[in-house]
Amino acid sequence: MRGFIVNTAITAVAFYVVTRFLPQFISYKGELAGLIALAVIFGAVNGLIGPVVRILAFPLNVMTMGLIGLVINAGLLLVTAFVAKTIGFDFTVGHFPPHLFTADTILAAIVASVLLSAVGTAVRLVLPD
């Protein structure tokens, strides 16, 4: 349980940093409590859908030496945006939702997933486990 709480807090910090400094990739209009809720949604999507997708994509993962993981993480970020918008949060990745997928949205999702991962890793290095 402690690990879930720490990971949720780290993800919330990563969302805060990326949404404040690079709003062209992911944007959120709301309060800090909403970022924590977004981190919980992201953790739930990552925990429920992520393992199944990663198992199914294992052959592609081997062939691309792990680069397909960027696309998987971007897709999970788009699913998080869809679920968050459905619940009522004003969270967008690129222009999704409300607009459909465009090349800009896919690029924004890939860049945002890399940035979220990098910021999350940096915060994990600072915080003791």
Image (tube, rainbow, N blue to C red):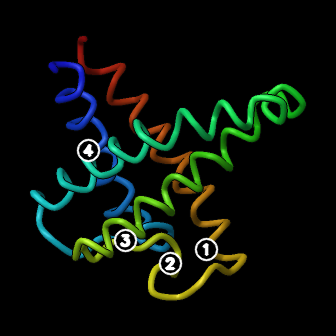
Could you give the CA–CA distance between mark 2 and mark 3, rounded to whole angstroms? 10 Å
Q: Is residue 50 above or below residue 96?
A: above
Which of the numbered marks, if any, corresponds to residue 13? Answer: 4
Q: Is residue 62 left or right of residue 91?
A: right
- Locate the C terminus and report the quarter of the image it occupies: top left
Give the mark, 2 or 3, whose residue is nearer the N terminus: 3
Q: Amino acid at mark 1?
A: Thr
Which of the numbered marks, if any, corresponds to residue 96? Answer: 2
Q: Amino acid at mark 2?
A: Phe
Q: Residues within 10 Å of mark 4 (few under 14, many from 20)?
A: many
Residue that label 1 marks: 105
Residue that label 3 marks: 27
Give the mark, 1 or 2, whose residue is nearer the N terminus: 2
| Residue found at the far bottom of this picture | 99
Could you give the CA–CA distance between mark 4 and mark 2, rounded to whole angstroms? 22 Å
Disc 1, SS: helix
